[in-house]
Image (cartoon, rainbow, N blue to C red):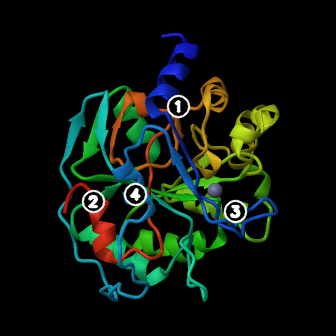
């Protein structure tokens, strides 16, 4: 298929513009506004579900996790043919306590309870590269795959999320804003390298966290140059791109394809991925006000 046709198809298929993903502290370009969501093809029901996941959210209902994970049998792996993958892709920003409730700050206790639940129910975190390979070519996948992603590169992901995930033997995917790599609020380069050595992957979350749909003159720098800078800095493949604020339009999707990325990461409500979604894979945001039950409701296998 011609690339231009793919872009038209993809954007038409998604037909959506989503706004979210602003952590508020990482770097000079951070935005701290209440995200809004505009979706052209999502149903009213799904928009409502995404914006208001529960009529009665609570902040402190997550029970304390048990201290030590119980051993699990090795998960069964099976061949997943190309074309479709069922695997929730979770999206987090901060894993830290915060005095003022903020949807982007999931507490370490909440996060640990969620990781414990995934572990107890046989979920295996896989790198995004494996999901993309399974979707495009076919690949062996664990029985209950999950992808655990973090946007913006915030320091507390290293200090709080990384050790918890290490304890459960799970790997994550970290979407970094390339120009922020030396900022004090983000994970230092050497610590990112430590995470990569432990099996984490990194992807680009742009150069400066601009809304790409409003900055077409910057698409090359934000999408292509950020990939090069991250590859040069970390000496690892950078094959996926997470759209800042989840915002996409045909020029930005086209540039992501042209820059050589194998997939694009967006926002959404689905854990089923097809080739039509390849450049806007749905990620399920885990908000700080979710109870464990609401977290479980995001997932395909209970
Ligand atoms: Zn972001």
The dot on residue 185 is none
Q: Residue at x 59, y 62 (%)?
A: 194
- Other residues around mark 1 within 10 Å, as few (<14) / some (14–19) / many (≥20): some
Q: Secondary structure at mark 3?
A: helix
User: Residue 48: which disc?
Assistant: 4
Q: Which mark is residue 190?
A: 3
> Mark 1 highlights which residue?
262
> CA gap, disc 3 to disc 1?
26 Å
Closer to the N terminus: mark 1 or mark 4? 4
User: CA gap, disc 1 to disc 4?
Assistant: 31 Å
**Residue 226, x across and y down, in percent:** 73, 42
Check mark 4 vs ligand 1: CB closer than 8 Å? yes or no.
no
Residue at 59%, 70% (x, y): give it. 158
Q: CA distance from mark 2 to mark 1?
A: 24 Å
Pointer 3 and pointer 1: residues touching (CB < 8 Å)?
no
Secondary element at tag 2: loop
Relative side of 252 to 50, left or right: right
């Amino acid at each position: 298929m011609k690339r231009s046709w793919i872009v038209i198809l993809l954007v038409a298929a998604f037909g959506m513009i989503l706004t979210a993903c602003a952590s508020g502290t990482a770097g000079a370009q951070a935005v701290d506004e209440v995200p809004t969501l505009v979706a052209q093809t999502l149903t009213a029901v799904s928009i409502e579900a995404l914006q208001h996941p529960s009529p009665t959210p609570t902040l402190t209902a997550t029970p304390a996790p048990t201290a030590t994970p119980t051993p699990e049998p090795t998960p069964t792996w099976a061949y997943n043919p190309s074309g479709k993958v069922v695997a929730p892709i979770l999206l987090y920003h901060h894993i830290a306590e915060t005095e003022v409730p903020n949807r982007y700050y999931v507490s370490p206790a909440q996060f640990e309870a969620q990781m414990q639940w995934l572990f107890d129910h046989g979920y295996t975190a896989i790198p995004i590269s494996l999901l993309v390979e399974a979707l495009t070519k076919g690949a062996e996948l664990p029985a209950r795959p999950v992808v655990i992603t973090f946007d913006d590169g915030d320091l507390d992901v290293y200090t709080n999320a990384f050790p918890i995930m290490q304890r459960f033997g799970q790997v994550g995917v970290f979407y970094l804003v390339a120009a922020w790599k030396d900022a004090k609020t983000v994970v230092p380069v050497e610590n990112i390298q430590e995470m990569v050595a432990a099996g984490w992957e990194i992807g680009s979350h742009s150069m400066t966290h601009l809304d790409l749909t409003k900055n077409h003159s910057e698409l090359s720098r934000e999408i292509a140059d950020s990939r090069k800078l991250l590859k040069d800095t970390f000496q690892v493949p950078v094959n996926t791109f997470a759209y800042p604020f989840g915002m996409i339009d045909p020029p930005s999707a086209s540039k992501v394809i042209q820059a050589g990325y194998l997939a694009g990461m967006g926002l959404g409500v689905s854990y089923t991925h097809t080739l039509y979604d390849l450049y806007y894979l749905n990620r399920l945001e885990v908000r700080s006000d979710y109870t464990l039950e609401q977290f479980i409701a995001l997932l395909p296998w209970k």
